[in-house]
């Protein structure tokens, strides 16, 4: 039996070879398609408006490597500026020299963290080359965050809207202020089952930028809902002064103290007392405010560490002042005559904040105001699932949309009838000193053919 001397590639090597082969095939196919579209646009453009000037070669980085192709530039007689009709038709900014899909993946990597540099490294590992530096990814993330926003789709408001409000503190760099609190809210219409999981229905994020928070949130709600005087707002939050002001802005509004924060505070004081802590947790779970406050009053001062006694007493008095906000919001809604079947305990804001805090606070990061707001907007964009090519769509936030609304009809001349006949012109060879050459005499011989 002969010895098998064939050296077979490993699965990793085989996959790498095929991927590089696909990159080459993709680049060649993309080049042919783009140049064919550009040629078709040239042939059918409105020649009275768009004057062909020249064709330039461009390199575009894509998910499958660099694609090199030629595109034509025109002079727009109507708008008095140069324009690439191919870019307009494909809704693509050729000056970026990077495909929209690759740019979107780079921004998505950056929003997931842990850093811009790590995002650039992950792209390089995926593609086999480094299309963008970490600074370029940061710049593109900021530009996208500042230029895009979702198109609000107004809908009829449900009987109850749920609002989870919270703040996220981030450190600032090169600023007099050491940090900045970002006031945010999650708005949803309730809960629904998705397989074995429960998810928030019609979840939307609101990131406050300037002015009064509740005034801004009110405008946000009116952009998305047809509100009337019968809509109830249930607000869940940690008890910060700016959150508790909600009841002075809305007619039918109930504020509820977030149980996550209450449990965290009480555990720090009485978590070392097993029986007491068990009864307190049971009272919280059952929204039994009376029993909760009674149990807290019965805790002896000697059972609390000396360094925490003053703070514990203050917190118990705080809960006594806010006992109304410890009630179950469903009880309040039932008293108002509303159906509460399917409504669950609130408190998803903290989980959402952890996602954003993981990206913005990990490793002691400090940010510029512009950079951190762009990052938060980008995280929200990917969590809500809207983007430049999503069904929900986007709208430009600036005045000058680089693409505008472009249609094929606006760029191509309408053909009303097929042209017949010939072009009248001059053959330069027959006008110069070479008109008596063999070629010139042959052309003259065709005269009258």
Image (cartoon, helix red, strand yellow):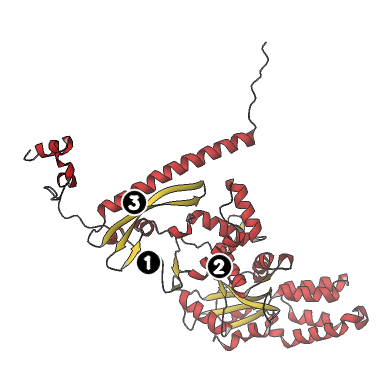
Q: Confirm whether residue 383 shows in the render.
A: yes
Check the image and report above or below for 129 versus 239.
above
The residue most toward the left is 448
Using the numbered discs, state the Cα–Cα distance from disc 1 to disc 3 in whole angstroms: 19 Å
Left or right for 318, reference 162? right
Q: Which residue does the numbered mark 1 point to in the structure image? A: 404
Residue drawn at the location 17% of the way across and 36% of the way down: 439
Q: Which residue does the numbered mark 3 point to in the structure image? A: 38
Measured from the top left, where is residue 411 in percent x and y? 29, 59
Left or right for 101, reference 164? left
Q: Secondary structure at mark 2?
A: helix
Check the image and report above or below for 257 versus 375.
below
Q: Secondary structure at mark 1?
A: loop
Q: Which residue does the numbered mark 2 point to in the structure image? A: 142
Residue drawn at the location 74% of the way across and 78% of the way down: 288
Mark 2 or 3, closer to the camera:
3
Q: Secondary structure at mark 3?
A: helix
């Amino acid at each position: 039996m002969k010895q098998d001397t064939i050296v077979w590639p490993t699965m990793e090597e085989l996959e790498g070879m095929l991927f590089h082969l696909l990159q080459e095939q993709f680049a060649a196919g993309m080049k042919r398609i783009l140049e064919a579209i550009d040629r078709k646009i040239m042939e059918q453009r409105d020649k009275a408006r768009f004057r062909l000037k020249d064709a330039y070669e461009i390199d575009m980085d894509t998910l499958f490597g660099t694609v090199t192709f030629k595109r034509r530039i025109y002079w727009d007689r109507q708008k008095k500026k140069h324009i690439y009709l191919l870019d307009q038709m494909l809704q693509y900014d050729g000056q970026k020299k990077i495909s929209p899909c690759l740019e979107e993946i780079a921004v998505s990597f950056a929003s997931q963290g842990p850093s811009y540099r790590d995002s650039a490294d992950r792209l390089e590992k995926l593609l086999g080359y480094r299309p963008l530096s970490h600074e370029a990814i940061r710049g593109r993330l900021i530009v996208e965050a500042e230029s895009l926003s979702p198109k609000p789709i107004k809908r009829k408001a449900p009987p109850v809207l749920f609002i989870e409000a919270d703040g996220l503190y981030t450190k600032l760099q090169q600023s007099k202020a050491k940090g900045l609190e970002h006031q945010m809210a999650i708005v949803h219409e309730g809960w629904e089952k998705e397989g074995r999981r429960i998810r928030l229905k019609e979840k939307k994020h609101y990131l406050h930028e300037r002015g009064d928070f509740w005034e801004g949130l009110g405008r946000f709600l009116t952009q998305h809902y047809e509100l009337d005087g019968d809509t109830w707002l249930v607000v869940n939050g940690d008890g910060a002064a700016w959150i508790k002001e909600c009841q002075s802005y809305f007619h039918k509004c109930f504020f509820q103290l977030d149980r996550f924060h209450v449990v965290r505070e009480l555990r720090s004081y009485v978590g070392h007392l097993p029986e007491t802590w068990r009864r307190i947790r049971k009272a919280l779970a059952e929204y039994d405010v009376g029993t909760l406050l009674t149990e807290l009053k019965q805790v002896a001062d000697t059972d609390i560490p000396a360094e925490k006694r003053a703070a514990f007493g203050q917190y118990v008095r705080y809960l006594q002042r806010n006992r109304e906000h410890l009630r179950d919001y469903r009880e309040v809604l039932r008293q108002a005559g509303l159906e509460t079947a399917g409504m669950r305990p609130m408190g998803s804001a903290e989980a959402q904040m952890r996602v954003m805090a993981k990206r913005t606070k990990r490793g002691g990061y400090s940010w510029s105001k512009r950079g951190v707001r762009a990052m938060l907007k980008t995280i929200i964009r990917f969590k809500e699932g809207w983007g430049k090519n999503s069904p929900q769509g986007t709208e430009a936030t600036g005045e000058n949309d680089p693409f505008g609304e472009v249609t094929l009809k606006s760029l191509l001349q309408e053909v009303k009838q097929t042209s017949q006949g010939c072009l009248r012109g001059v053959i330069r060879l027959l006008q110069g000193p070479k008109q008596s050459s063999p070629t010139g005499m042959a052309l003259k011989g065709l005269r009258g053919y």
